[in-house]
């Protein structure tokens, strides 16, 4: 079934992957789960392969999708903290399952130990 309007998801799987798909979203959600609250600089250090522009864009998308909460403190210099929303927390068991699956596949292919996430 072809959908002419690309903004409307074709099915619920399409809807879900539009929210968490991509190179960085899953990792950002996982890191926020592990650390509870992270500042922009901490996220930037955790994702060395992301550009500042892409990190900002990805965080805005996650916030727009109500998966990440952004809290701004009115101080100088500005302080911004990111955390998972309740909706974002609901995804953690699935992301963890994907992480475990990835660990098994990497071990099968390479015989290596787990990667650090």
Image (tube, rainbow, N blue to C red):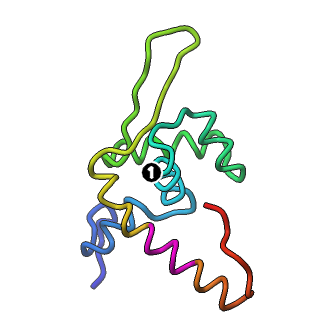
Query: Under tag 1, what secondary structure?
Result: helix
For image coordinates 34% across by 49% down, the residue present is 67
For image coordinates 25% across by 72% down, the residue present is 12
Is 109 located above or below residue 94 in the figure?
below
Is 84 located above or below residue 106 in the figure?
above
Magenta span: predominant SS is helix
Residue 83, x across and y down, in percent: 41, 40
Side (left or right) of 96 relative to 8: right
* CA neighbours of label 1 inside 10 A, class few (<14), some (14 to 19), many (20+): some
Residue 27, x across and y down, in percent: 54, 57
54 and 78: which is toward the camera: 78
The N terminus - image quarter: bottom left
Residue 14, x across and y down, in percent: 33, 72
Which residue is tagged 1?
33
> Which image quadrant for residue 117?
bottom right
Q: Is residue 100 magenta?
A: yes
Q: Which residues are magenta?
A: 96-102
92 and 15: which is toward the camera: 92
Q: Residue furthest front?
A: 113
For image coordinates 65% across by 50% down, the residue present is 47
Side (left or right) of 109 relative to 54: right
> Which image quadrant for residue 71?
top left
């Amino acid at each position: 079934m072809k959908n002419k309007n690309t903004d409307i998801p074709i099915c619920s799987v399409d809807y879900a992957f539009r929210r968490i798909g991509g190179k960085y979203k899953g990792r950002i959600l996982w890191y926020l789960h592990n650390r509870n609250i992270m500042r922009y600089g901490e996220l930037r250090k955790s994702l060395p392969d992301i550009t500042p522009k892409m990190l900002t864009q990805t965080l805005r998308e996650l916030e727009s999708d109500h998966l990440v909460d952004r809290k701004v403190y009115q101080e100088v210099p500005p302080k911004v903290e990111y955390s998972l929303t309740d909706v974002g927390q609901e995804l953690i068991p699935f992301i963890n399952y994907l992480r475990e699956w990835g660990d098994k596949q990497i071990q099968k292919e390479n015989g290596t130990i787990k990667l650090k996430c």
